[in-house]
Image: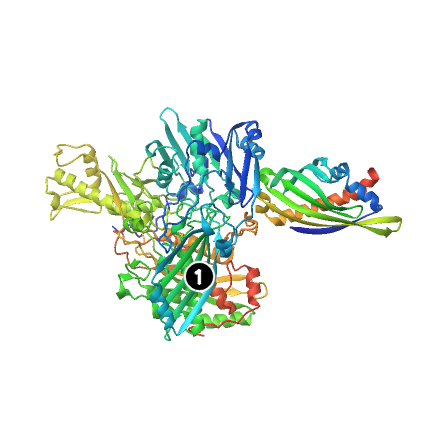
Amino acid sequence: MASETGIGASVKRKEDARFITGAGNYTDDINAAGQTYMVFVRSPYARAKINGIDTADAAATDGVVAVFTGADLAADEIGDLPCGWMVKSKDGSDMVAPPHPPIATHAVNYVGEPYAVVIGETLEAARNGAEAVDADFEELPAVVDLSTAASADQIHESVPNNQAYDWELGDKAATDAAFDSAHHVATVDIVNNRLIPNAIEPRAALGEYDAAAGTYTLHTTSQNPHLERLVLAAFVNVAPEARLRVISPDVGGGFGSKIFVYAEETAVIWAAGKVRRPVKWRAERSESFLADCHGRDHVTTAQLALGEDGRFLGLRVKTKANMGAYLSTFASSVPTYLYGTLMAGQYTTPAIYVEVQSLYTNTAPVDAYRGAGRPEATYVVERCVETAAREMGIDPAEIRRRNFIQPGDFPYDTPVALTYDTGDYEASLDKALEHIDYGGFGARRAASESAGKKRGIGFSCYIEACGLAPSQVAISLGAGVGLFEVGEVRVDVTGSVTVVTGSHSHGQSHETTFAQIISDKLGVPFENVTVLHGDTGRSDYALGTYGSRSLAVGGSAIIKATDKIIAKGKKIAAHMLEAEEDQMEFADGTFTVADSNQSITFGEVAFSAYVPQNFPLEDLEPGLSEKAFYDPPNFTYPAGAHICEVEVDPDTGVVDIVDFVAVDDFGHVVNPMIVEGQVHGGLAQGIGQALLEHGVYDDAGQLVSGSYMDYTMPRADDLPSFTVDTTVTPCTHNPLGVKGCGEAGAIGSTAAVMNAVTDALGVASVSMPATPETVWRAASACGEAPKAPKEGE
Amino acid sequence: MEQAGESRIAQPRDRVWRALNDPEVLARCLDGCKSMTAVGDGEYEAEVGAKVGPVKATFKAAISLNDVIEPESYRLEVEVKGGAAGFAKGSATVNLEEVAGDDGDETLLTYRINGNIGGKLAQIGSRLVDAAARKMAARFFARFAVDFDTA
């Protein structure tokens, strides 16, 4: 049903009314009677032995309810924070993860690691108490530099060489052979800079313990409350799953950083049981910088082997990935199965070999951040391709065309374990070239030159594996959980519909998009559909939101449940119309007997389902409520072409993004306005990485970019007015034909920007972020590297 | 963090030296100093309230004097703990040079501070800490120079 509120319509967001009027209900908005406040006492040292912690003064501080250290959690048999994905090294050995107590016991290993908690009647009292905690630290030399971490001091007793694993993927012999026969080899050395997520809402938690029922309720800022509950129950031992409810109310952005199970939420819910009162914690922004998992942080050397005709023959990638001080919830999977597997990009490169050594340092743990592994992979592939084009004197658009997997090649098996189901990469590139007016670039560059500026254009033809994930594949690769999703469609007596999804919305707009799907499929007015999410007490176990999966996996579960509703509705309608079930047809909210004018509305069927008259109860149950679990048979593969045009002022080093075009293939689009918004946000984050953002630790392991004075978030005036467009090859294996759009902007854009900046300067590389200082210094080497010829130049 | 500076004091070197070794003088001249106690030979403990940007705390400092060449120079080692506010540690080399002034002997005091900071102090930005330390040093020497008149 094509309508103003159905699939494909740019319906305004249901969520916005409450968000823009300040009526959102975030964790910190929720208060419980008798609530206490928790403050974390955090290590000022990057690495130190704890010789003792004196909590007496803190406990005696006015208004302090309790002070706990790691020893108290250990005494209650509270377990370590686990990593949920087992990655094996080349030699077949298991990855090595150090013990990770929620509250440090014997040593602290990064600045900001909590070593005590203070609970107060007021926040002020808790803070005063925290000031009075006296720890005796013995400072040790910090391991900070990733490139030398393997040969530095051993951080954890159980982790030799500070190595989590040394992983490989692909056919080394075939790749070596490809290089032996290469006409040209392009080499890039790149650093993928550490990012600090900075969701607009800091993490928060409110833990409550009901002594009468013996149940715990945790309100928190989690992207996946079921995972939080599973880990807290099964690994951390706070309470059995059935006696622990985790609720994620409105959440202000996550970008991956709110997937993980952290020390703070764990301490809050445990302490609520301990002090028998509600316990509240909300991170200060300074704490978020220190204690949220960071993203990226790779050092990589990559080589692309090419034939004389510019065809890619082989790709070799060697990466060191920074894990930080401990292995966070999904940290191990990010630089491996979400990274190495994407090295084919959109190309037919026949032989690929990837090696990743993941190392511990005395820095905050690193885990998934918008794109998670795929931006890093895209950066490697697209910097290699651009470098090869320049070195071989081939137009950067042309070299990509020569190597694209063609529409007739699908399903396409890459040499790095994935099977792409569909795509048309040239269609996206063509559209992007048209939008940016590639033919006019030469004239624009000349105009810039005459004004004393340097103009450059950069391409990035990215691909991502989204819609995480086929459980069977993920589990065989080491995932500790299945990755399906649940959807429940409850038709109310009066015909309105309540949808319960296991995936969570913290900016993705489920309440709108999922209502559009239901409205479209069931013919129910859009405003009569309510979407509930983020509550383990309401939905069955499912996996939440990450990896651009909500629509492709969560939406598909809802479609499956909706199909069941329609099937049941047909039974009821057939009963009411005294027709055969297989004669019933359903369209536009009406059940009709085939080839007749006998029909009945969806609303009438719903009412009848709950006011059952003469139902043949053995064949037909009352009620109209269905649930489905959807486990995707494959990943989805959103792909697209991003082109960035920059003008650089060589005198100041300022990079001005004068144009940015993103043409993405997300398959079918349910709400184009929301998709455009997701792309805009992703582009801002990808551009932020390229030009502005950098998480920096000094040699002693102090976080020196720990506030907005030193960590530069992208602002509106840093960004151009984006041109966003789409092409469509529907996903072949989910009922909506959708692929996911949440991460694409952050995945594709970074490489496009850096390819443009280096093109403008005529240098082989510029390190990220390309701040004015970095660019100004690089400008002194202007014109030293070859430039690729461009159409119209 | 590295800082250096100098201050010319219209007093003979011996007098400056004595003042520099007098905890009471030091306590009077140091902004926010709540106490300064000699706890041993050339060892002091101090409590100083200081504000660096948004970080406000009482810092506990353990100070020891080393390489003392009376009345010319010493090296001051400081370890500062500010609890949740973080820590600082470093050393300051202080040199006194006799110079001729218009009205008699004067003293040129030069100092060089080396230090590093950690925790919240480092996080909120070493630029702020540098500025705060510079200001603190400037105020200290301004007061120190005139303290001889009041003493």
Residue at 42% across / 66% down in the picture? A303
Q: Residue at x 18, y 41 (%)?
A: A569
Category of crowding for the residue at label 1, using alpha-carbon neighbours closer than 10 angstroms: few (below 14), some (14–19), many (at least 20): many
Residue under label 1, please give it.
A751
Q: Position of residue A594 (x, y in %)?
A: 12, 47
Coordinates of residue B13 in the picture (x, y in percent): 83, 46
Q: Nearer the viewer, residue A735 or A724?
A: A735
Is residue A19 among what the camera can see?
Answer: yes
Q: Please, what is the three-letter code of the amino acid marked with disc 1?
A: Ala
Res A31 seen here: no
Left/right placement of residue A401 relative to residue A491 reads right
Subunit ID for the residue under disc 1: A
Closest to the observer, B141 or A739: B141
Quarter-of-image position of residue A31: top left
Q: Is residue B131 above or below residue A406?
A: above
Image quarter for residue A84? Answer: top left
Quarter of the view holding residue A781 = bottom right
Residue appearing at x 27%, y 62% in the figure: A410
| A254 with respect to A127 (left or right) | left
